[in-house]
Amino acid sequence: MTDPATLRQRFLAEPHTLRNERRDFHAWHRGRPHYLLWALDVDAPPLRARVTAAQRALDGLLLDGYMRQPHITLALCGFAATGPLRAEDEFDDDLIATQLAALQATAPPAFELGIGGLESFSSAPFLSVHDSTDALATLRRCLHTDGSHPQGGYVAHVTVGLYADAWPTAEVVRRFRALDDAPHLPCQITRLSLMGYVAADIGGELFTLADYHLAERRLQWREARTP
């Protein structure tokens, strides 16, 4: 797990943050309505309060309308396949079945994470995540049965928002000090969730299709929704 000091050094190595914008991104989703991912739903009052505190510390720097609930992404599924051969950014029932079999074979039981203070990627600030048992690495091995994470190195995080412009990183990082001494929030993890969002809505609210219960080793589908 990457330590906060290294994360901050990486952020400061870039002179400016990346500007996000609110638009359709049709060239990416090509009319496919929903994008799915496996994540840990950590939307509880103490964590929600810390996310709000982080957003206040970064007031004026973030893109308006970020509605995603606090979550920790584990693996990207993509868009639902529309033909017999799925594209690189798509998933099908076979992929979900393979992931489920791996979870049932080797996923850890319930475990605890610690949620820390502010760090950042160039495009988005986040709360750091501390995993003393390496449970996240085990879960990711189950979910990435076809190889490594498609975006390379993995940093567990809880996204706070998206930067609205190209801000100097040296100035942005001064805002992080408001949460530098924040104690780790304990977060008990008993399930992981198959979640999704409307692809045309950057920062839109997440919905949940199913939950995998770690202790019972079973997948529970919620109310049917076409992905």
Image: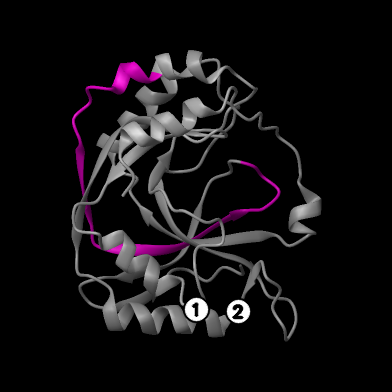
Q: Residue at the spot x=66%, y=66% of the render?
A: 89
**Which quarter of the figure has residue 78?**
bottom right
Amino acid type indicated by mark 1: Ile
Q: Residue at the spot x=24%, y=51% of the render?
A: 131
- State whether residue 221 appears in this view: no
**Which quarter of the figure has residue 20?**
top right
Check disc 1: other Cα within 10 Å, few if <14, some if 14-19, many if 20+.
some
Observer-nearest of 214 and 183: 183
Decide if residue 16 is on the left or right side of residue 26. Answer: left
- SS label for mark 1: helix
Q: Which residues are magenta?
A: 176-202
Check disc 2: other Cα within 10 Å, few if <14, some if 14-19, many if 20+.
some
- Above/below status of 20 relative to 165: below
- Provide residue 191's location: percent of width, then percent of height: 30, 64
Residue behind mark 2: 92
Disc 2/disc 1 C-alpha distance (Å): 7 Å
Observer-nearest of 90 and 170: 170
Residue behind mark 1: 96
- Provide residue 223's location: percent of width, then percent of height: 47, 68
- Above/below status of 68 relative to 192: above
- Provide residue 220's location: percent of width, then percent of height: 37, 74
Q: Residue at the spot x=58%, y=41% of the render?
A: 203
Observer-nearest of 154 and 206: 154
Amino acid type indicated by mark 2: Asp
Q: Is residue 186 magenta?
A: yes
The image quadrant where one finds the C terminus is bottom right
- Kindly identify which numbered label has been placed on residue 227: none
- State whether residue 163 appears in this view: yes
- Provide residue 50's location: percent of width, then percent of height: 31, 30
